[in-house]
Image (cartoon, rainbow, N blue to C red):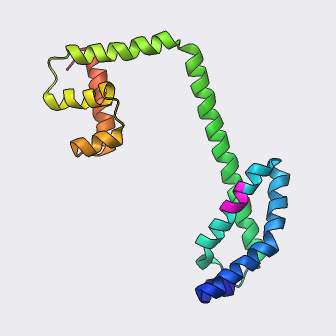
Amino acid sequence: MIIYQQKSPEQAFIAFDEIYRRFSQNVFSFLIKKLKNEADAEDLLQKIFIKIHESKHLYSEKYKFEQWLFVIARTSLIDHFRSNKRYEKKIAKLNSSLAEDSAEYIEDSFAADIDVLNSASQLNENQKELLKLKYIDELSYQEIASVMNKSENSLRKMVSRLLVNLRKGVV
């Protein structure tokens, strides 16, 4: 690892190749035992070695390399499990939300928003343009941001507030 940290790019490449050759199978075995999925283990193995490369400057000789490597592997594994749990929760929430709402309701709600937009004569031109770009032209916030020279976050807030106010009849 010291050679990988401090030597020329050619020597560093050889050193990293040696590190990978020596330790990748042990890390892969550790991941397979924990994940029980070969494809996920392979993906995570690659991410771990990318992390090693990105954080090579943090390695210190006072630690055994293998211990340092397995701290990275264990942390990456924990992050993987956490992100999967978050993803599964989001999918479950989306599925339950979709189960409660029928497709007709979603279409009617969207159509109602368009009707509100069309009938909202009290909106100024910028507000009308923003809602038109979002709901009629179906542009993303990123695309709208480039057209209107505003940040995506501010546009999200503006649209949200406009729709709430339109539904209440405030605007």
Residue drawn at the location 68% of the way across and 86% of the way down: 2
Above or below, 89 against 105 in this view is below
Name the spot of residue 89 as percent of width and height, x first.
Answer: 63, 33
Residue drawn at the location 85% of the way across and 60% of the way down: 29
**Which part of the image, by quadrant, shows the C terminus?**
top left
**Magenta stretch secondary structure, dominant:** helix
Camera sees residue 130 = yes
Quadrant assignment, res 61: bottom right
Residue drawn at the location 60% of the way across and 21% of the way down: 96
Q: In the picture provided, is 25 more to the left or to the right than 126?
A: right
| Residue in the foreground of this view, choosing between 141 and 94 | 141
Name the spot of residue 125 as percent of width and height, x first.
Answer: 14, 29
**Which part of the image, by quadrant, shows the N terminus?**
bottom right
Q: In the picture provided, is 15 more to the left or to the right than 126?
A: right
| Residue in the foreground of this view, choosing between 6 and 139 | 139
Name the spot of residue 88 as percent of width and height, x first.
Answer: 65, 35
Is residue 89 shown in magenta? no
Above or below, 19 against 24 in this view is below
Residue drawn at the location 80% of the way across and 64% of the way down: 27
Tell me the magenta residue range: 43-47
Above or below, 14 against 50 in this view is below
| Residue in the foreground of this view, choosing between 99 and 17 | 17
Above or below, 159 against 120 in this view is below
Q: In the picture provided, is 146 more to the left or to the right than 25?
A: left
Camera sees residue 153 = no
